C-alpha cells in the first residue's frame, strides 16, 4: 500500500519506520532540511542497527497515496489539510490527533475518514532518528461508519505494531480526551511525571475534580473513567506527558485541543478545567517572554 | 519602652533594628546559634555602616516586656504563644501574621491584643544581617477595641519607620488577606514576580476569579479590592511574594493561614481558591520528596 505520513515529528517518524518495512511510505514534512536528511540518511530507530531508506517530500509536493495518516498536532492540522485535500477522493484519511477539536475540520473532507488514538511512546532525537520509548497499540474507528475499516486495519496491522479496530469513534476519542484533560495539564503545571497523579495526594484530588468535569461534559461514567486515568498514570508512571515536554521545550501545547475543546462545548461551569486551561496559557506566555 | 520581638526571621530582624535605636529591644529566637550571633555581632542592616548592639534570648527564656511583637509565621504561632503567655498581663501583644487564622488563638490570651499588617519588604541575609528591600508602613488596630492604641503607636512610630493607627481590625486584616490570597499562590505556582498578576493576561484572569471568591467569603466590595490588588501588584512589581520565596527555598508556606483560612470559613463553593490551596500543598509535597 502507498502510505503518506503527514508530519515528521516523533509519531510521524515512528509510524513511517514501522510501516516502511512492508509498505511504500512517503513522509511529508514542512522543512526542506528535514526532507533532505530523510532522503539521504534514511530513517533510524535508536535501537536498530541500520537506517531504513524512506522517501520524503514537502507537504506542498503532495501526490496521490492509498492512505494518508495525519501525525501533526492539532494546531497545525488546518494548514496541512488545505495542502492535502486536492488528492484522490478514494484515499483514506487517518487522523491521530489528541483531543476532539479536529472533528470540526472534517465537514469539508470528501475522502473516507478514520480517527484513532496512539498509545505508543516516541521521542524524536533528530530529523531522521526516533526512539520508541513505549510499546503500545493504535486504535482506529471509522468516522461516519461507512468505510471498510476492516480491510485497512488488516493491511496496516503488524505483529509488533498492532492496530485495534473500534466501532464507536466518539467513545474512542472521548475516553482518550479524558485521560489527556486530566494528566497532561496537571503534570505540566507541577513539573512532575505521570505517576504523581496518584502518588501526590493534592495533585490526585485536583485530578479527580478534572475527571468529574471532563466526564460530565463528555457524558461518560465518572467512576469507570477515573479508574482508567489512575491505571494509565500508573502504567506510564515515569513518563513526562506531551504537555509537560512542550512546556519544558517552550513549545506551543495542545491546550486548545484538550482543555480548550471541553470549554468550547461545556454548558455549565467547569472551574477546574478553566483553571488549568488558563494555567497552560499563562506558562506559554511566560515562556514566550523569556525567549 | 522594653520591647520583645518574637522571631528572628526577616521581619523580626527588621523591626528589632529600627526599634533598637530608641527602645530596649530583646529578640527572642529558637536557635542557640542565632542567639549567640546576635549577642556577639549585633544586628546589621545591609546598607548601614555598623552593627547595632542588641540583646537576644531563646523563646523559652522569656521575661517581662512592655510589649511583645510576634513576628513568626502563622504555623509557628501556637507554639511560641505557649511559651510567652506566662508574662505580665499588662504587656501589649502585637500580632503581625498574614491571613486571619491566628485570630482563633486569641481566645485564651489575657493581655491586650493588637493586630497589624506590615508593608515593608525585608530579606534575611544571615542570622544577624537583614536587608530592607522596600520601605512601607506598619498598620495597627486594637483587637476588641478597649486598649489605648494611641499611646502605643505614639511610642513606636518613627519618622523613617511609621506606624498607622486603624480602628477596624477586621477590615485591616481582611483587606490584607485578599491581597495575599490572590497574589501569593499565583506567583508561587507560576514562578513569576508580582507584576505578572497584571501583565500576564491568563494569570490576570485567574487573579480576578480568586479576588471574586475572597471578597465574597470576606464580605468585601469586589471592585474596590480588585483595584487594590492590581495597585499592589504594580507597586511591588519586581518583588517575589513570600510564598514564591518559600516554595523556591523548599520551606513551608503560609498556605493554611491564607487560602486555607478562606476555605475554613467559606459557606459556598470556591473552586479557584481550592485549586491554588491544593496546588501549594502539591508543591510542598513535591519539594519534600526532592529533599
Image (cartoon, coloured by chain):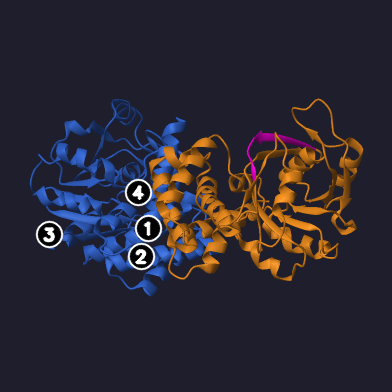
Chain colours: A blue, B orange
Pointer 1 with pointer 2, Cβ within 8 A: yes
Pointer 1 with pointer 4, Cβ within 8 A: no
N-term-proximal mark, 4 vs 3? 3
Asked if residue A181 lies in the magenta stretch, the reply is no
N-term-proximal mark, 1 vs 2? 2
Give the CA distance from mark 4 to mark 2. Answer: 16 Å
Residue toward you, B217 or A163: B217
Pointer 4 with pointer 3, Cβ within 8 A: no
User: Which is closer to the viewer, label 3 or label 2?
Assistant: 2
Give the CA distance from mark 1 to mark 4. Answer: 11 Å
Q: Which residue is mark 1?
A: A273
Q: Which element is circle 2 on?
A: helix
Query: Tag 2, which chain?
Result: A
Give the CA distance from mark 1 to mark 2. Answer: 7 Å
Please tell me whether residue A189 is drawn above or below residue A144 in the rendered image: above
Query: Tag 1, which chain?
Result: A
Labels 1 and 3 positioned on one and the same chain:
yes
Q: Position of residue A273 (x, y in %)?
A: 37, 58
N-term-proximal mark, 3 vs 2? 3
N-term-proximal mark, 1 vs 4? 4
Please tell me whether residue A137 is drawn above or below residue A226 in the rendered image: above
Q: Which residue is mark 4?
A: A255
Asked if residue B133 lies in the magenta stretch, the reply is yes
Q: Position of residue B47 (x, y in %)?
A: 74, 27
The answer to whether residue A214 of the structure is visible from this angle is: yes
User: Which is closer to the viewer, label 4 or label 2?
Assistant: 2
Pointer 3 with pointer 2, Cβ within 8 A: no
Q: Which residue is mark 3?
A: A147
**Picture disc at residue A213:** 2
Amino acid at each position: 500500500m502507498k502510505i503518506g505520513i503527514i508530519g515528521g515529528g516523533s509519531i510521524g517518524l515512528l509510524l513511517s519506520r514501522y510501516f516502511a518495512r512492508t509498505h511504500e511510505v512517503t513522509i511529508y514534512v514542512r522543512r526542506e532540511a528535514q526532507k533532505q536528511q530523510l532522503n539521504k540518511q534514511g530513517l533510524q530507530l535508536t535501537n536498530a542497527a541500520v537506517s531504513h531508506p524512506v522517501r520524503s517530500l514537502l507537504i506542498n509536493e503532495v501526490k496521490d497515496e492509498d492512505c494518508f495518516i495525519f501525525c501533526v498536532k492539532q494546531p497545525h492540522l488546518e494548514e496541512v489539510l488545505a495542502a492535502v485535500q486536492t488528492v484522490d477522493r478514494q484515499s483514506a484519511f487517518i487522523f491521530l490527533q489528541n483531543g476532539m477539536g479536529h472533528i470540526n475540520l472534517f465537514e469539508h473532507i470528501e475522502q473516507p475518514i478514520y480517527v484513532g488514538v496512539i498509545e505508543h511512546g516516541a521521542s524524536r532525537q533528530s530529523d531522521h532518528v526516533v526512539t520508541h520509548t513505549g510499546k503500545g497499540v493504535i486504535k482506529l474507528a471509522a468516522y461516519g461508519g461507512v468505510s471498510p475499516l476492516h480491510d485497512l486495519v488488516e493491511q496496516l496491522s503488524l505483529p509488533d505494531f498492532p492496530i485495534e479496530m473500534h466501532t464507536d469513534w466518539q467513545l474512542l476519542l472521548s475516553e482518550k480526551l479524558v485521560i489527556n484533560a486530566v494528566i497532561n495539564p496537571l503534570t505540566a503545571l507541577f513539573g512532575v511525571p505521570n505517576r504523581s497523579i496518584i502518588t501526590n495526594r493534592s495533585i490526585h484530588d485536583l485530578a479527580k475534580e478534572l475527571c468529574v468535569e471532563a466526564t460530565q461534559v463528555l457524558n461518560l461514567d465518572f467512576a469507570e473513567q477515573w479508574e482508567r486515568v489512575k491505571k494509565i498514570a500508573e502504567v506510564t508512571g515515569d513518563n513526562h506527558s506531551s504537555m509537560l515536554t512542550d512546556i519544558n521545550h517552550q513549545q506551543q501545547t495542545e491546550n486548545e485541543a484538550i482543555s480548550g475543546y471541553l470549554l468550547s462545548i461545556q454548558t455549565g461551569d467547569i472551574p477546574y478545567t478553566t483553571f488549568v486551561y488558563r494555567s497552560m496559557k499563562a506558562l506559554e506566555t511566560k515562556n514566550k517572554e523569556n525567549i
